[in-house]
Image: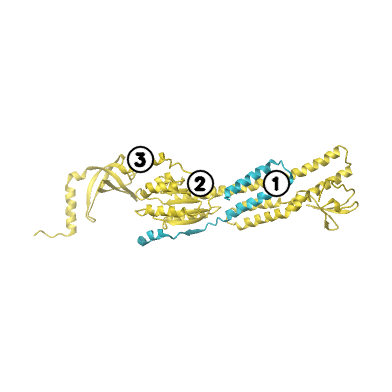
Chain colours: A yellow, B cyan
Amino acid sequence: MNKILTIKQLNNYIKGVFEDEIILHDVTVCGEISEFRLIGNNTFIVLKDEDNVLSCYKFGVVETMRVGAKVKINGKVTFHPNSSRISLNIRRIEYDGEGEQRLALLQLKKRLVEEGLCNGRPLPFLIKKIGLITSAEGAVLHDFISVIGEASVKPSITVYPVRVQGSEAVTTVLKALEKANETDADLLVLARGGGSQTDLICFDNEELARKVNASKIPVLSAIGHETDYSLCDFCAAARAGTPSIAAQMVADINRKALNKLLETINRIETAVKWSFESAYKSAENKVLKLYKTGILSVSKLKDRVIKCCFSLSKCEIIDKKRKLISDCCLGLSQGVNETKSMSDRKLASAVTRLDLLSPLKVISQGYGKISVDGKEINDVADLKKGDNIRVVMRDGNADAEIINIDRRKDYEV
Amino acid sequence: MKFEDNLRELELLVNQLEKGEMPLEKSIELFEKGVALSKICINELKECSGRIETIKTELDEIIGGDEE
């Protein structure tokens, strides 16, 4: 009967056999990288061809290698007694072209490009609702939400939890895309943090890439790190390097929309102010022209100017509409006050200035309000020669006497 | 109507107002419309609440089981 050995004795014996076999000290093997991981300063690679795999490792970093690449690796085959594993301790690794899997992916990509699926499409002007398709765990969700939290206009976020790696990833993401497309979201964000090439492989799925492209609601794809491109990235409306960058893109889009609105409100302000000024100027010019042609005496000129101001400030149009407009402005101010989370100071000041332009404030622009014995006068018809009037202007009152009344003949009540 | 449509209409209106070739009455009318449109746009931005919700669907069932 053979001697009974402990596992340790056996494994150490096997290790000795490997050590004694000189050929195993210097072998070169070729294959396709199916897994590639950096753990600390060490590199772990799984090499495969057809159904066979080989674990390889190197104490040190191997750069510029990716999953799918064909490589030749030279090193020493070692047996590890503790785990009963065999692996290749890498001495040299060299690139030997693209592997089959990688080539198939490149061909698929080429086909999708030819079909016009990789052209992207514009993102919405304003994003009020986002459908976020991502893992319920992990940093992505947290990062995305915290960047959005800093945005001047914050969209609401509906999270569709999915698997982002493994066999169920494609199915769950497809279902989430379908579900999210039934909503009125403005944008869908497909997000996943970085990982090894193998982890991200589900986002190279053809069916998924096509679904992303066909989505009714535009999809912003943010998969992996900035340097990794998946098929979904290529077929989406737009691509963001990382989920955080995607959130920043959304924040920027909304900030632009808000700024555009502010800018337009500022323009209304300027334009309406100008309208008032030019109406005043043209009235003033008419009076001056009459004076220059000698039709008006100096004393009558003074009277005319007062009346011009008067008719402008009391003009029927303004009178009728001022309540409506001031209500609008008030509503606007209130609306803005409630919108605390927006960059409100800017918006509020724009609206306050808009409010100042309401005809109620016209008086502050140089027009006067006329009353007799405290009763507001709107029509020349309510005045008679010799009446003592009070003109209220922005910096005080002036009392005057009516010396002449010249009612417009064509004026109809 | 969408935010961008309202904003576009607002811009067209401001363009018209900026030309200044109209009586004061018309200007005020446009201004009034502009204020109303601004209000609609602002209200739409107000809807952006940053609310967050998670959809509970059959997705959870798929994911749920082996997550422990």
Q: Which residue is mark 2?
A: A123
Pick out the residue farthest to the top.
Answer: A293
Instruction: Bin the neighbour count of mark 3 within 10 Å (Cα to Cα): few under 14, some 14-19, many 20 and up.
Output: few
* Alpha-carbon span between mark 1 and mark 2: 34 Å
Q: Secondary structure at mark 2?
A: loop
Which chain does tag 3 point to?
A
Quadrant for residue A277, please give it.
top right
Sequence-first disc among 3 and 2: 3
Q: Which residue is mark 1?
A: A272
Instruction: Bin the neighbour count of mark 1 within 10 Å (Cα to Cα): few under 14, some 14-19, many 20 and up.
Output: many
- Where A413 sits versus A26, above or below? below
Task: Tell me whether circle 3 and circle 1 mark residues in contact (CB < 8 Å).
Answer: no
Q: Amino acid at mark 1?
A: Val
- Towards the viewer: A317 or A16: A317
Q: Position of residue A275 (x, y in %)?
A: 72, 44
| Residue drawn at the location 30% of the way across and 45% of the way down | A33
Q: Are marks 3 and 1 on the same chain?
A: yes
Sequence-first disc among 1 and 2: 2
Q: Which residue is mark 3?
A: A107
* Alpha-carbon span between mark 3 and mark 1: 61 Å
